[in-house]
Image (cartoon, rainbow, N blue to C red):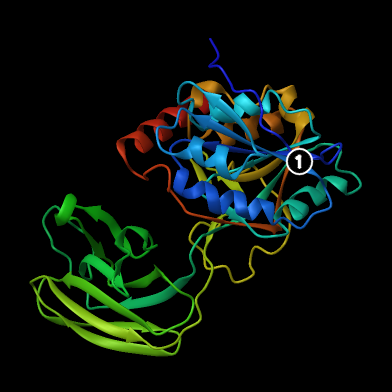
Amino acid sequence: MRPTRSTWSPVPSESDPAATVIIVNWNGERWLRPCLDALARQQTARPFLTWVVDNASSDGSLALLETEYPSVRVLRNTANLGFAGGNNTALREVTTSYAVLLNNDATPEPDWLEQLLAPFDSPGTERLAAVTSKVVFAPRFLPLQLDAPGFVPGGADPRDLGVRIASIVVDGEDITSRVLWERLTWGPEGEGAGRFFWTRPSGEMLLPLPHSTGPWEVTVRWAAEGGKDVALSWEGGDVSLPVTGELTEQSFTVATASPVDVVNNVGSIVFTAGYGADRGYQDVDAGQYDAAADVFALCGCAVAFRTSAGRELDWFDDDFFLYYEDTDLSWRLRAAGWDIRYEPKAVVRHVHSATSVEWSPTFVFHTDRNRLLMLV
């Protein structure tokens, strides 16, 4: 049985809206205001509707929507149907030519919707099913190069290691969980207060910055196998700091630097084993993804569908709940002869894993399960 839904709230008075923007929400009160406010600032001549699907939130989401956003239609599910089922709640009711999905933790640039829908107007795009956005991480980042003498622990551990980092703080704010350093570290080890990351001897980390202009005070809590010096460098500066076999804190000041945007997704790809991946993930945005391109798969964070194409395939598979549902739909669209395009001018800023935790048991279960389900 399908969960019951609310009657709809007032909608903007424009006639014949071109698109319906759908936002799925589950206990995302803190993200809704910046998301919806950014939608209200869209610079487009195309009338559009805004719908929020609430997956049985227990926070203040519904009260916020009712009091501050009366023109937003709210569709209330009586259970958490996840990303797939939540979006399907709205998608199966859409009557506009285009259905647009936007994560509740994403904020679009002012011309995002116009740029996202524009490719559908081009000649020869009758089989264009979806246009996927350029998704960058919400903050701007400081690229920080680390170089340290390496060592191999030996025995059962053949890794080449640099230093063991327990925490990084910028201007008094602990940013450890938001540092982008998958290419520098070997991943998290330990749990709780004892969690740490071994780095490789050399590589780059990207520090999210709390404000766009310096100076920034950076404090690193770290250790190594013994005493040695670690070199840290950034645009316009560098420092050499000692590290010992015991956890200690070292601080330094970055007086000035040019913060950068970092790519979250510019379309998705699938490897031969069926694993999906974000194209461009954690690449510094240096213009290398500024050309529109056909891509294998869309990213459900911020995408526009031709409604007739999605309806032909009955939208997402409800069984996916969350993760891989967008790649599965992309595969089915392409198998049916539809195209998917990446549009670099349609930019959103995304708080990655704001409403789900990467590498949590839920994340691991659904990504592994749904990858296999997609391949069946």
Residue 281, horizontal then vertical, whole percent: 51, 56
Asked if residue 162 lies left or right of residue 311, the reply is left
In the rendered image of this protein, does residue 296 appear above or below residue 173? above
Dot 1 alpha-carbon crowd within 10 angstroms: few under 14, some 14 to 19, many 20 or more: few
Q: Quadrant of residue 149?
A: bottom left
In the rendered image of this protein, does residue 140 appear above or below residue 301? below
The residue sitting at 79% across, 54% down in the picture is: 44
The residue nearer to you, when weighing 235 against 82, is: 82
The residue sitting at 52% across, 68% down in the picture is: 284
Q: Residue furthest right?
A: 123
Query: What's under tag 1, amino acid-wise?
Result: Pro
The residue sitting at 39% across, 69% down in the picture is: 207
In the rendered image of this protein, does residue 256 appear above or below residue 71? below
Residue 314, horizontal then vertical, whole percent: 68, 21
Q: Label 1: which residue?
A: 12
Secondary structure at numbered mark 1:
loop
